[in-house]
Amino acid sequence: MRTATTEAVRGRELFGRILAGDSVDAPAVAFWKHHPVADQDGARLAEATIAFQRQVDCDLVKIGPASSYQLIDYGLRDEWIPDGIGRRTVTHRPVEKPDDWLRLPARHPFEGFTGKILTCTRIVRRAIPSEIPVVATIFNPIFQAVALAGIERFLDHAESAPVELSRGLAILTENTRLLMEGFREAGVDGFYLATQHASATAMMPVVYDRWGSPGDRVCVEAMRGTLSMMHFHGESIRLEAFPSSVHVLHYDWALPGNPSVRQVMNQFPDTVVASGLPHEGLPTCRYLLSSGCVVPLNVSNDKLAAVAEKYRKV
């Protein structure tokens, strides 16, 4: 392990040192929120993202669209009902019968709702200083499939209609890969791949390994050559589902059944861990200080800025 100089560094240079395993005096700090209502329009989401960054001053900017943004063009419908972390409520799921998987269309990323988020990304990348990395949020194919059908129908089709489900997941996976190419063209520095089902409490491991891991592998390959991040959501996360080639693992160490930060670092010695302040103290290397998931809406931006400033001091 090399020791960095005491000169304060930020953003891209700081991430370079952390990824290299350098010991640093101050960690990289990054928080993000959902931006409800604004997340339905590319320009408004860009405006909210830029305003958040200018106020909180993070070492990384994550584009944070609604979790449904990859699904609207397939016919999913949702609405904004006030929620503590800014999630939207699904009102219609388009997959009901096995044949509905076969009707999922091939999508061009610059069209429809995903095109709005690509517009947002281009605006944000132009506005944010080049030394601050910008990453795009991608929800993995199995998350998309579960959202389109609902968890009970998804599990039923996994048993009763595996051919149709497999075809549907292939379409979702290819469309996701093309969307990631679109984000690269829009100028992102990396990707934040989110999974909500690599958890023993969310889905049986055998189901995730069969239906989720193949799509994850395609997405991980599509992240190659960029700053790659992966979020494991919820309790009792399954570290065996984490691809060790990904640079950053983001999770909430404080949730029941989750490993400690030290356990993750021991198991993945080349991986940067992103989470809240650990019980054992702030690591001096391979750590991104963040929250365990998206920051609740009732946490003020001023408070986040104060936290970032506190831990950034050298």
Image (spheres, rainbow, N blue to C red):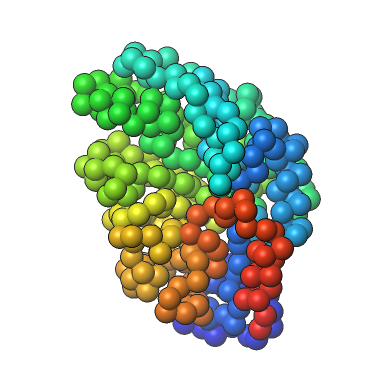
Q: Residue at x 33, y 65 (%)?
A: 259
Residue 132 visible, this orientation: no
Please give left or right for residue 244 compared with residue 206 in the image.
right
Please give left or right for residue 258 compared with residue 83 in the image.
left
Q: Quadrant of residue 40?
A: top right
Q: Is residue 154 above or below residue 193?
A: above
Name the residue at the right extreme: 127
Please give left or right for residue 220 compared with residue 153 in the image.
right
Percent across and percent down for residue 184 are 61, 43
Q: Is residue 292 above or below residue 297?
A: below
Percent across and percent down for residue 39 are 65, 37
Please give left or right for residue 97 compared with residue 117 in the image.
left
Q: Quadrant of residue 88?
A: top right
Percent across and percent down for residue 255 are 38, 60
Q: Residue at x 49, y 36 (%)?
A: 177
Q: Residue at x 62, y 76 (%)?
A: 311
Q: Nearer the viewer, residue 16 or 291?
A: 291
Q: Nearer the viewer, residue 240 or 152?
A: 152
Looking at the rendered image, the quarter that the C terminus falls into is: bottom right
Percent across and percent down for residue 137 are 55, 45
Q: Quadrant of residue 159?
A: top left
